[in-house]
Image (cartoon, rainbow, N blue to C red):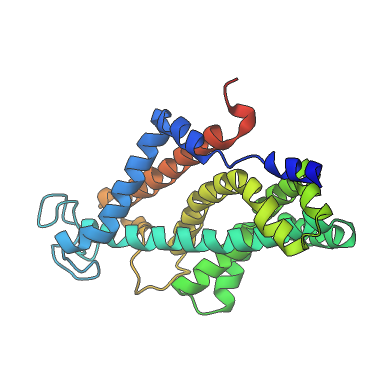
Amino acid sequence: MAELAVGRERKPGSGFSQGLRRFAENRAALAGLIVLLLIALMGFIGPLVYPVNPFAIVATPMAPPGDGAPLGADYLGRDVLAGILAGARVSLFIGISATFCTAIIGTVTGSIAGYYGGKADTILMRITEFFQVLPPLLLSMVLVTLFSPSVLTVILSIGLVNWIGTARIVRAEFLRIKGEGYVLAERAMGAKNGRIIFRVILPSALPSLIVVTTLQIGIAILFAAALSFLGLTDPNVMTWGLMIGQSRPFIWQTWWAVTFPGIAIFMTVLSVSLIGDGLNEALNPRLRPR
């Protein structure tokens, strides 16, 4: 029993404090975090500072930047800046919500497959491979088309097609960790499977899960922009993809109505990618300096 107690004492800590320090030393990751916070601030506080309805016609159609609107107007005379502010809030909400769905599905699938193995692993991996061979964007378009296009259906469709990578990473972590001494000690002391999965193995797998989940936010935002660009979202909700898709036929006359929302998408996805890379370097033991 003493040996089991020692094995439990050797359980490694999360190392989040050291990881945060390494993350703070990564200038690119910090820059990405600052940009993302500014975009979030722009989306949630911007409409209060600049209270313009993004669907209201407030300027001359195709008015250039500065002529009645700070960033110009689209082909209908709608304020581009107001649309970007409203789109920031919606894009971040869709990206975070869809990633939450992806994380839940992928974590449950990967943890069951990696912990129990055997037939459960075989069946779940065959299901994962089936979804992996399907084009995710096309499948998401089909799911949104089958139901009425809305923010909710976009979130669910993105979450249902992007969980494969999360499931594989969680499964690999469970396969690696379940043979560790502290896990075997918990099992020998009679701990139930639920405790071992959620209280012992999953916390040790959190660093990899945090990294892949962060990167999934950028993917979800790109998916949402693509669906909006194709008109597969609620037309009464302003998004960056919707702005680009509606102004695309007039790109040569109103380049600002396409360029500024495109820059917003680019900066958001880039900042999320920089944060994900910084978290990977900070939390991945293989990348830590000796």
Question: Is residue 27 shown above or below 141?
Answer: above
- Taking depth in this image into account, of 148 and 27 the one nearest to the observer is 27
For residue 119, which quarter of the picture? bottom right
For residue 45, which quarter of the picture? bottom left
Query: What is the x, y in percent for residue 221?
Result: 46, 55
Is residue 39 shown left or right of residue 52? right
Q: Image point 33% across, 61% down: which residue?
A: 89
Is residue 45 shown left or right of residue 209? left
- How many callouts does the rendering have? 0
- Taking depth in this image into account, of 102 and 146 the one nearest to the observer is 102
Question: Is residue 142 shown above or below 180?
Answer: below
Specify the farthest residue to the bottom. Answer: 148
Quadrant that contains the C terminus? top right
- Taking depth in this image into account, of 243 and 115 the one nearest to the observer is 115
In this view of the protein, can residue 259 be seen by the observer?
no
Query: What is the x, y in percent for residue 256?
Result: 26, 49
Q: Image point 46% across, 58% down: which residue?
A: 95
Is residue 284 shown left or right of residue 23? right
Question: Is residue 286 shown above or below 103?
Answer: above
Q: Image point 10% across, 57% down: which residue?
A: 68
Query: What is the x, y in percent for residue 223?
Result: 51, 57
Specify the farthest residue to the top. Answer: 290
In this view of the protein, can residue 58 be seen by the observer?
yes
Query: What is the x, y in percent for residue 205?
Result: 65, 47
